[in-house]
Amino acid sequence: MLVKDVMPQDAMQMLKNGDAMLIDVRTEGEWERDGVVRIQDKVIFLSLFTGPQMSPNPNFIDDLQILELPASTKLLFICKHGGRSASAASIVAQLGYGCYNVAGGFEAWKIHCLPRTQVRGSQECT
């Protein structure tokens, strides 16, 4: 299946419509350091890579399948800039899900002042 890029604002609208889930594939360290998307019950944290060596997460697909998401669920993938999330979306699309890559990743999400946790030292939206 084809993976489509979506702008952060469009991804937010898809999440508000209720027929999509956002999968953040960054590392735990990135979540803690940079913050996370804040949308209640719509975000899944599942690292594509793990550890300081950024080794592929061997459990990525199994951990996703354990969630038993309906096949009709649109899956939006996000990372820091959009590269890892595009890879994750391509992998998961092979399972038959409608997959989307959030263009520009979490950095673009922040630029557009979309809901996120605010970490110390990060710039506030105005």
Image (cartoon, helix red, strand yellow):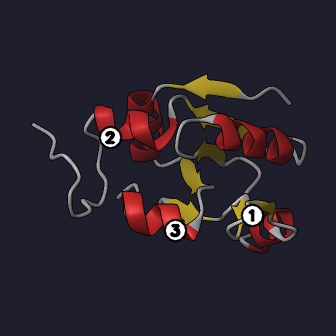
Label located before the other in sequence (2 or 3):
3
Amino acid type at mark 1: Gln
- Residue 69 visible within the image: no
Q: Quadrant of the C terminus?
A: top left
Q: Is residue 11 left or right of residue 120?
A: right
- Is 79 in front, or is 10? 79
Q: Is residue 123 left or right of residue 23?
A: left
Label 2: how many residues lie within 10 Å, few (<14), some (14-19) or many (20+)?
A: many
Mark 1: few/some/many CA within 10 Å (<14, 14-19, 20+): few
Residue 90 rendering spot, x and y as whole percentages: 81, 38
Which residue is tagged 3?
Answer: 29
The residue that disc 1 covers is 53
Q: Which residue has dot 2 on it?
A: 110
Q: Check if mark 1's residue and mark 2's residue have beta carbons within 8 Å.
A: no
Secondary structure state at the residue bearing disc 1: loop
Q: Secondary structure at mark 2?
A: helix
Marks 2/3: CA–CA distance: 17 Å
- Describe the element under mark 3 as helix, strand or loop: helix
Disc 2, disc 3: CB below 8 Å? no
Q: Amino acid at mark 3?
A: Gly
- Residue 54, by quadrant, is bottom right
